[in-house]
């Protein structure tokens, strides 16, 4: 339907009223690839909800609760000797302000499919917080991230020990960035 028009001759103003229907921006990706003799056929699936709502999920409002602009993504990949799983979530309006806060979790497992002479398992977690700054202008923001990764290497034939020692290794990362973004309209209606 077209816009509603309300003309006020006395104040010389016009009010236009549009009825809009929100469109889905969710994504579903399915793919397959050949990874050679060691990986074989790799199948991948990813689903991303770009207008997710945890609050509506907790309140039981529908099977796919939407409306809060949160982003939730799930990925799974599987091959003959490889598997990878990940989950990520971003809250774009933490505490009612445009300060994105999010996390991601991941797990990978890579092994020799012929004689089990090596295996590499990786578990990871990362969180971040982004905040707008008022100085030097309103277009600056800072982003802080903390990550943790654990590697578990079983290496009978020396394939990975050039870069990672056999056994369990851990890694902690800290990141800090300063950026400026002056895009006029970064959100798509």
Image: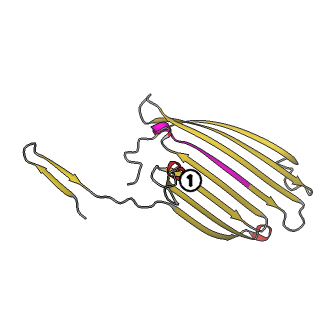
Q: Dividing the picture into quarters, in which one does residue 109 lie?
A: bottom right
User: On the rendered structure, is 157 left or right of 80?
Assistant: right
Q: Which residues are magenta?
A: 95-107
Residue visible at 84% across and 53% down in the picture: 160
Instruction: Name the side, left or right, on which 153 lies relative to 73.
Output: right
Q: Is residue 100 left or right of residue 186?
A: right
Q: Position of residue 122 (x, y in %)?
A: 76, 51
> Could you say which is closer to the camera, residue 85 or residue 80?
85
Q: Position of residue 164 (x, y in %)?
A: 83, 47
**Vertically, is 19 above or below 101?**
below
Q: How is the image coloured?
A: secondary structure
According to the image, label 1 marks what residue?
72
In this rendering, does residue 168 appear at all?
yes
Quarter of the image for the C terminus: give it: bottom left
Residue extending farthest right: 156
Pick out the residue farthest to the top: 135
* Left or right: 170 in relation to 118: left
Residue at horizontal 57 percent and vertical 66 percent from the top: 29
Find residue 183 and report its horizontal and vertical position in percent: 40, 45
- 59 part of magenta stretch: no
For residue 144, above or below residue 82: above
């Amino acid at each position: 339907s077209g816009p509603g028009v309300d003309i006020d001759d006395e104040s010389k103003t016009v009010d236009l009223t549009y009825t809009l229907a929100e469109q889905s921006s969710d994504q579903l990706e399915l793919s397959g690839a050949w990874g050679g003799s060691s990986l074989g056929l790799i199948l991948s699936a990813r689903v991303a909800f770009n207008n997710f709502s945890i609050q509506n999920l907790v309140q039981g409002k529908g099977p796919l609760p939407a409306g809060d602009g949160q982003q939730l993504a799930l990925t799974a990949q599987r091959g003959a000797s490889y598997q990878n799983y990940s989950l990520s979530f971003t809250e774009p309006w933490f505490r009612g302000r445009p300060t994105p806060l999010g996390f991601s979790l991941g797990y990978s497992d890579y092994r020799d499919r012929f004689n089990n002479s090596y295996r590499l398992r990786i578990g990871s977690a990362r969180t971040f917080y982004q905040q707008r700054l008022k100085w030097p202008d309103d277009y600056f923001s800072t982003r802080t991230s903390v990550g943790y990764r654990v590697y578990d290497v079983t290496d009978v034939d020396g394939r990975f020990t050039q870069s990672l020692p056999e056994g369990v290794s851990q890694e902690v990362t800290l990141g800090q960035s300063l950026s400026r973004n002056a895009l006029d309209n970064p959100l798509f209606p």
